[in-house]
Image: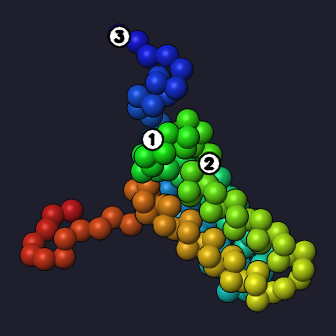
Amino acid sequence: MGYSGEEYVENMKSLFHEGFFQIQRLHYDWLKTQAAREKGNFLRLRWLLDSITIELWNDAIRLDKETTRDEEIKKDPEKGERIMILRKIDEDISKAFSAHHNETIYKLLMDKEKFLKRIQEESGKGSKLIDSGGDFEL
């Protein structure tokens, strides 16, 4: 039995382990993000967080589809909670940059960074948690 369209894409397995390469890209972007934040380079930090957003966008859509009971969101996942939060944060960041309000810019960039890290964890592309009790094997 063959698949067609979206069904085919959802059932494909990557031969090139794109997930590994995405995690690598995310790791490097997070390192650059930390450096930009420490230097107070808000514009660079903004662009880096936008790059991370692009990397995690499809994961946010998938997570919204998997966790909602709302049929409207299942039909149009770009209206899901995570996507709408990212859009709202970006809108607020743009307004803060236009107003040159550094304290607000910093707070919003930190909110976006924390939210993106949450999406990364929820999508399984963050840290691996293990049971801390007793012996364990890696």
Instruction: Report whether 2 appears left or right of 18.
Output: left
Could you say where residue 21 lies in the image, as x and y percent from the top left?
A: 52, 49
Q: Kindly identify which numbered label has been placed on residue 17.
A: 1
Say which label, 3 or 2, has the lower sequence index.
3
Name the outermost residue toward the left.
134
**Residue 81 appears in which quarter of the rendering?**
bottom right
Q: Which residue shows up at 45% across the image and 31% down it?
A: 10
Give SS at disc 1.
Answer: loop
Residue behind mark 3: 1
- From the viewer's side, name the closer residue of 78 and 42: 78
Instruction: Report whether 76 appears left or right of 63.
Output: right
Say which amino acid is labelled 2: Lys
Q: Pointer 1: residues within 10 angstroms few (<14), some, or many (20+)?
A: few
The image quadrant where one finds the N terminus is top left
Q: Which residue shows up at 76% across the image and 71% down it?
A: 92
Residue behind mark 2: 79
Q: Pointer 3: residues within 10 angstroms few (<14), some, or many (20+)?
A: few
Name the outermost residue toward the bottom.
103
**Residue 40 appears in which quarter of the rendering?**
bottom right
| Distance Cα–Cα, label 3 vs label 1 | 25 Å
| Distance Cα–Cα, label 3 vs label 2 | 32 Å
Q: Is residue 125 visible?
A: yes
The answer to whether 9 is drawn above or below residue 32 in the figure is above
Labels 1, 2: front one: 2
Q: Which residue shows up at 72% across the image and 73% down it?
A: 45
Give SS at disc 2.
Answer: helix
